[in-house]
Amino acid sequence: TALVMYEVLHQENPDHLGLTAMTGSLNVMYANAFVQAPADSLPNEQFDLQNAEYKRAKMHYLRGRDYCLDALEGRHKGFKAAVLANDFDNVDKAVAALDKNDVNAAYWACAGWLGAFSLDPLNADLVGNLHSPAAILEKAAALDPDYSSGAIWELLFSFYVSAPADFGGNYDRGLFCHEQSLRASGGKTPGPYVSYAESVCVPAGDKKGFEEALGKALSVNPDDDPSSRLMTTITQKKAQRLLDHESDYFLEW
């Protein structure tokens, strides 16, 4: 309901940059919490439904990205075209112009961008310009390193440890970003632990580390920060689901 309301308000006020960014962020939140998250829990025999939901989530991720890029374009003419192209020099020049007032829109633009990539990693249009979201997030992290309890660092971590090196992946940088996300959150948000379990422990075959990380995620009290209770609860459900299906990720000999 909130998403539809903001879409209508945006159509009535297309030049309102704050409203544009909010509409974008809501699309990204909706894609993650209410489309992708339920789809992730579907059993294998419901593959067709899961795939359809992933496509719907991707649509909302990209819709949210584009709204947020429009908001940044409103403050920095030429920004959107520059970051959607593949000229790294132009991307870096555009990103250098961002300031602290742009951090929120920048974060949600990249959350949508990388969310779409995670669901369709072979898409040439998305793979071809991954330099842009990484550069935008690095700039945002420099401008506001503690934004949303380390959310920028958490997103950078997930990208760096998951993306191929040829497309911007950097494992060591990713581990640094993970440490920064824990510092900024004070260990009081479950997201960094779940991301670590999925992105580091599973590929390494580290079952013990997997269990420890998810245990820490589940130990977070959602009531400690009422403003993030919904996302904490959703993330903890994912953590529990990963633990319940642990045998899917680790071979027992």
Image (cartoon, helix red, strand yellow):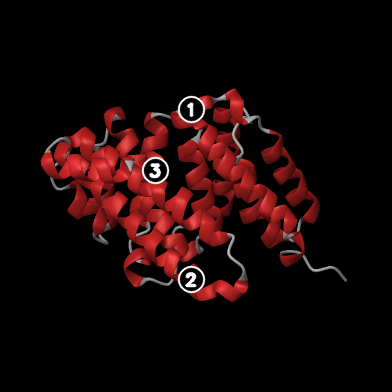
Q: Are marks 1 and 2 in contact (CB under 8 Å)?
A: no
What SS does tag 3 mark? helix
Residue 14: x and y in percent read 13, 42
Q: Residue at x 85, y 68 (%)?
A: 252
Q: Quadrant of the N terminus?
A: top left
Considering only vertical position in the picture, is 221 above or below 72? above
Q: Earlier in the sequence, mark 3 or mark 2?
A: 2
User: In whole angstroms, how far apart are the C-alphas of marks 1 and 2?
Assistant: 32 Å
Q: Nearer the viewer, mark 1 or mark 3?
A: 1
Residue 245: x and y in percent read 72, 60
* Number of residues whose C-alpha sits closer than 10 Å to that of mark 3, classed few (under 14), some (14–19) or many (20 or more): many
Q: Residue at x 54, y 29 (%)?
A: 184
| Amino acid type, label 1 | Ser
* Number of residues whose C-alpha sits closer than 10 Å to that of mark 1, classed few (under 14), some (14–19) or many (20 or more): few
User: In whole angstroms, how far apart are the C-alphas of marks 1 and 3?
Assistant: 23 Å
Residue 133 can be seen in this image: yes
The residue beneath circle 1 is 227
The residue beneath circle 3 is 137
In the depicted view, which residue is nearer to us: 58 or 96? 58
Left or right? Give the position of 233 relative to 53. right
Q: Earlier in the sequence, mark 1 or mark 3?
A: 3
The residue beneath circle 2 is 49
Residue 152: x and y in percent read 45, 39
Q: Residue at x 55, y 25 (%)?
A: 225
| Amino acid type, label 2 | Leu
* Number of residues whose C-alpha sits closer than 10 Å to that of mark 2, classed few (under 14), some (14–19) or many (20 or more): some
What SS does tag 1 mark? helix
In the depicted view, which residue is nearer to us: 205 or 36? 36
| Amino acid type, label 3 | Leu
Q: Are marks 1 and 3 in contact (CB under 8 Å)?
A: no
